[in-house]
Amino acid sequence: MQLKHLRNSSIDFIRWDKCILESLHPLSYAFSWYLDIVSPGWEALISEDYEYVMPLPAKSKFKIPYLVQPILTQQLGIFSKLEINESTVEEFIKEIPYYSYELNLNEKNFHSKAFIYPNYLLNLNKSYEKIASQYSKNTQRNIDKATKLNLIIKENISVEEFLTFYYFVDKKFLSVQKPVLEQLIVKGISEKSITLYGVLSNQNNLIATLCLLHSTNRLTYLLPVSNAEGKSSSAMFFLIDFLIKEESGKDTFFDFEGSGIEGIARFYKGFGAKNQPYYILKRFRPAFLIKK
């Protein structure tokens, strides 16, 4: 396979987005509008006629270029409407023009030398009743608890409302710069790829929010956050159950963006989600490149 390394200015974004949309794994993270925000100046490896494409999230430090997985982007890797086998993955890896990289490949990009990370998906192609019958007892108990508290779901809360709540609740989220997140959400809403949800208490106070990312056949649990009352009220159990009810019976997956932390994984599995791993490839990076 003949591959080309393209700088950002040389990428045909119309053909790029067409390839992602028609691929076997059309993740929102890989569309040009998303990459433009989370990895400005991103580059690419492409095959002839954009049949296979791979984004290269390039950065540099002390004028040394390297590749690192962008924020809010669980998986990238190779995309195509054709099957991708390990030899195809190896061809692309060999053509990466930078010595140092840490890349999250998608679930269709198996590589025997990659690290395997969990990701939890719930297939929504059955009726709500059938999906809900697979909830764990703990999950159903939390949903019942939230229902008795008369919580309220609010769709399309404002960007300002979401960001204010998001950054107020937990300071760890400061690692995602507010201008970047705001730009991503505003653009995502305009692309009909992001919806903001809020959960209100029976006193009409915002106690939980979710930034939900949509692609062709996937709803991604991108940015969930609950305050103390939201956690004690099981607000996120309530919201996820609401979304499952709304989207059940469709050829769609609910993507929890899995975690290796057992308590979080148990929360996802409590809704019946199954582990569909993705792959991470790393090549040595000098220590001064590790801090992003």
Image: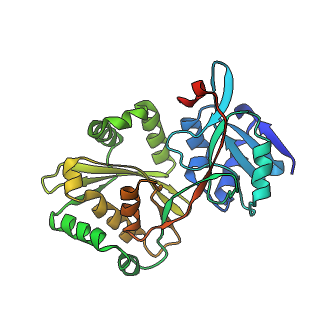
Q: Residue furthest right?
A: 2
The reply, left or right, for residue 159 in relation to residue 11 is left
Q: Is residue 60 visible?
A: yes
**Side of 41 where 237 appears, left or right:** left
Residue 199 in the image, given as x and y percentages of width and height:
26, 54
Can residue 200 be seen? Answer: no
Horizontal side, residue 70 vs residue 237: left or right: right
Q: What residue lies at 66% left-to-right and 31% top-to-bottom?
A: 66
Give the residue drawn at x 45%, y 58%: 256
Q: Measured from the top left, where is residue 191 in percent x and y?
A: 52, 48
- Residue at left 49%, top 43%? 72
State the residue lying farthest toward the left. Answer: 203
Residue 132: x percent and y percent? 35, 76
Q: Nearer the viewer, residue 286 or 161?
A: 286
Q: Quadrant location of residue 107? A: bottom right
Give 154 or 44, whichever is nearer the viewer.
44
Tell me if 91 is positioned left or right of 125 in this view: right
Q: Is residue 181 above or below residue 221?
A: above
Color scheme of the displayed model? rainbow
**Quarter of the image where one finds residue 202:** bottom left
Number of disc labels: 0
Which x, y percent locates residue 176?
43, 35
Q: In the displayed structure, would residue 134 be above or below residue 170? A: below
